[in-house]
Structure formats: C-alpha cells, structure tokens
Image (cartoon, rainbow, N blue to C red):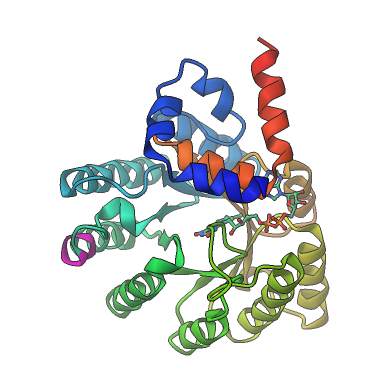
C-alpha cells in the first residue's frame, strides 16, 4: 500500500517541483544521490575507482517537457562523457530515453542517443539504456537493437524481471549478442503485464539470470537481494564462469555492506551513481523499494 502510494507520488509534478526546490533537499538526497553538479559526481567516481569499484553515471531527469530540454540533457551527458575520458574513469553512462525526448519525437530521441553512443564509442565506453515503465519497453528495445547494429559493444539494454514478456526479450537480446543489465523493475505495473508477488519476481529473476549467464554477452546482475546474489555466486562457481564475463551492479548508497563484501571477494562491481537537480522521481522509487527509508530520511531531517 505504502509502496503504491510512493510510486503514485513519484509521478506528481506539483510535489516534484516543490520537493526539488525545498531548502532541505540536500539532506533528503545525500545518501542516494552523488550531488547536484557533474564535479560532485566525478569526485565520487574517483573515490569509487580508488576502491576498485566501477561506475555508471546517471544525469538525473526523465520525462522532460520539451525537445529543448532533451537537447540540454544530451549536452549534459556529452560533458559527463568528456569528464570520464579526461579523468580516465572506469565508468559508463546510464540514460533514460524519455530524458532524450522519446515522448515528443522518436526521431529526435534517436538522434540524441546516437550522438551519445557514438561519443561513448570514441572514448571506449558504453551507454546503458535504462528501462522505464512498460509503456516504453518496445520502443526502448527497438532503439537499443538499432544502436547495437551500428555501435556493437557500446550499448547495453536493461530487462526487468517483473515483466511476463522478459524471457522472450532476453532470448532475443542473447541471440543478437546485446549485453543486458537484469533488474527486478521499479515502476508501478498492472497485473496484466507484470508479476505482482515478490516471490514470482524473484523466481523469474533467477531464471533469467541463469539464462543470461549461459547465453548472454557480458550480463550485469543488478540488485541488492542477498539471496539472489548468493545464488548467482553459487551458480557462477558451479558453472565455472570466468570473472570477466559478467558483473554485479548496485545503486550508490544502498547495501554498502554487501558492496564491500563483493569487492573483498574479487567480484566486479559497478555502482549506479546519479547526480543533478531532478532527483525527485529517483528518490521516490528508492523509498518505494524500501519504505523503511522514509523513516531513515525523516530521522536525518530531524537530526538538524
Ligand atoms: C544498477 C541498477 C540499475 C537499475 N536500473 C533499473 C532500470 O533501468 N529500470 C528499472 O525499472 N529498475 C532499475 N533498477 C531498480 C531495480 O529494478 C529494483 O527496483 C531495485 O534494485 C530494488 O530491487 P532489489 O534487487 O534491490 O531487490 P529487493 O527485493 O527490492 O530488495 C532486496 C534487499 O535489498 C535492499 N534494498 C533494496 N532496495 C533498497 C533501497 N531502496 N534502500 C535500501 N535498501 C534497499 C534491502 O535490504 C532489501 O531487503 C536498477 C537497480 C540497480 C541496482
């Protein structure tokens, strides 16, 4: 119930406007967001790199309200890629297609994302195309497939285990050798398209994870579920899968204990590091995943 309410509130523009301009916003976000500016984020990436942790940089923003905003987001990502190159960081970027104008023009969005992937190719990194709600799944996978055809090795798709369709999508992506990040899924979806019970989502995640480890191209196992991480490690050892064939991915600020343990055991770990002013929907999804975070943030605010 609380999860549904938080996801509903995550899409309310009036609350978003108010929260993002609130004087307490820094206190609300510091745990999960690297900072407002690119330089804040680069500092975090450098620190992570010194701890042997890879990263993927997310310039916050989704469902932009004009093609001008989409072009501005593209410009911000180009600056981020330039900084990644300058500082020689082991980092990719993560991008949402609605941030690049998908709601206004598929053609403009295609031009924007192509610019980014081409730049990533030049500097030897990759663009990870985040998956948004199921209203965008077909268009997102279509664009990622096109990008892979022209820039193989420089784009990664994301698959959400809560969607019934995902096994078919994973098989299609494996057949085309498109790298995949597997996550559970963070949006409010109806029972007509997605598993509602956590146990069913988890079971589908494990099934798709094994499929990706067997047939995928450099899959990323994204999430913080300790049972799933344990099962992944058991399976990887049992199948004798080489450490450079896959990676774990987690969100900045979440389950830092588990992150440290993976690094200590020599696994490849990439953290998803968001930065920027448009943090509201991102934070609300993190609260919805773990409503106890609401209490954590409230305590933070009260602490003065
Ligand atoms: C690198 C990365 C990229 C992602 N990209 C996408 C994407 O493109 N599209 C998309 O829909 N979703 C994306 N997600 C979010 C994902 O779909 C899940 O919503 C999120 O990872 C929570 O699921 P979980 O695997 O942590 O498992 P859960 O079953 O939700 O949680 C397992 C345990 O993890 C810890 N935990 C989980 N979430 C939190 C939290 N917010 N705060 C504190 N502890 C927490 C708790 O200990 C919890 O018991 C991404 C996640 C990661 C890690």
Q: How many marks?
A: 0
| Residue in the picture at 17% in, 49% down | 67
Left or right of 170, for residue 110: left
Q: Find the residue positioned furthest to the top.
A: 304
Q: Can residue 76 be seen by looking at this rendering?
A: yes
Left or right of 146, for residue 299: right
Q: Quadrant of ligand 1?
A: bottom right
Is 235 located above or below residue 130 in the figure?
Answer: below
In the depicted view, which residue is nearer to us: 159 or 150? 159
Q: Position of residue 264 (x, y in %)?
A: 79, 50
| Residue in the picture at 41% in, 29% down | 39
In the depicted view, which residue is nearer to us: 189 or 74? 189
- The secondary structure that most of the magenta stretch takes on is helix
- Which image quadrant: the C terminus? top right
Is 106 located above or below residue 174 in the figure?
Answer: above
Magenta-colored span? 106-110
| Residue in the picture at 45% in, 20% down | 22
Q: Position of residue 147 (x, y in %)?
A: 30, 73
Q: Which of the 4 quarters of the picture holds residue 92?
A: bottom left
């Amino acid at each position: 119930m609380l999860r549904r309410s938080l996801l509903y509130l995550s899409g309310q523009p009036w609350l978003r406007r108010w929260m993002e301009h609130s004087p307490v916003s820094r206190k609300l976000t510091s745990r999960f967001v690297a900072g407002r500016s690119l330089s804040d984020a680069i500092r975090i990436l450098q620190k992570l790199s010194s701890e042997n942790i890879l990263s993927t940089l997310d310039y916050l923003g989704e469902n932009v309200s004009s093609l001008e905003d989409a072009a501005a987001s593209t410009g911000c990502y180009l600056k981020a890629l330039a900084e990644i190159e300058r500082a020689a960081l082991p980092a990719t970027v993560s991008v949402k297609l609605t941030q690049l104008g998908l709601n206004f023009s598929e053609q403009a969005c295609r031009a924007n994302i192509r610019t980014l992937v081409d730049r990533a190719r030049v500097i030897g990194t990759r663009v990870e195309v985040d998956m948004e709600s199921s209203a965008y799944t077909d268009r997102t996978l279509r664009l990622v497939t096109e990008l892979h055809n022209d820039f193989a090795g420089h784009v990664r798709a994301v698959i959400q285990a809560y969607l019934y369709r995902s096994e078919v999508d994973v098989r299609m992506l494996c057949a085309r050798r498109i790298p995949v990040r597997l996550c559970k899924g963070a949006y409010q979806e109806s029972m007509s398209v997605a598993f509602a019970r956590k146990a069913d989502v988890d079971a589908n995640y494990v099934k798709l994870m094994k499929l990706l480890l067997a047939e995928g191209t450099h899959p990323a196992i994204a999430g913080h579920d300790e049972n799933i991480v344990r099962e992944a490690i058991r399976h990887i050892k049992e199948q004798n899968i080489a450490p450079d064939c896959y990676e774990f991915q987690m969100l900045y600020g979440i389950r830092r204990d588990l992150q440290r343990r993976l690094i200590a055991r020599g696994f490849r770990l990439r953290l998803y590091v968001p930065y920027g002013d448009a943090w509201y929907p991102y934070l609300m999804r993190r609260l919805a995943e773990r409503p106890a975070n609401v209490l954590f943030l409230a305590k933070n605010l009260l602490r003065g």
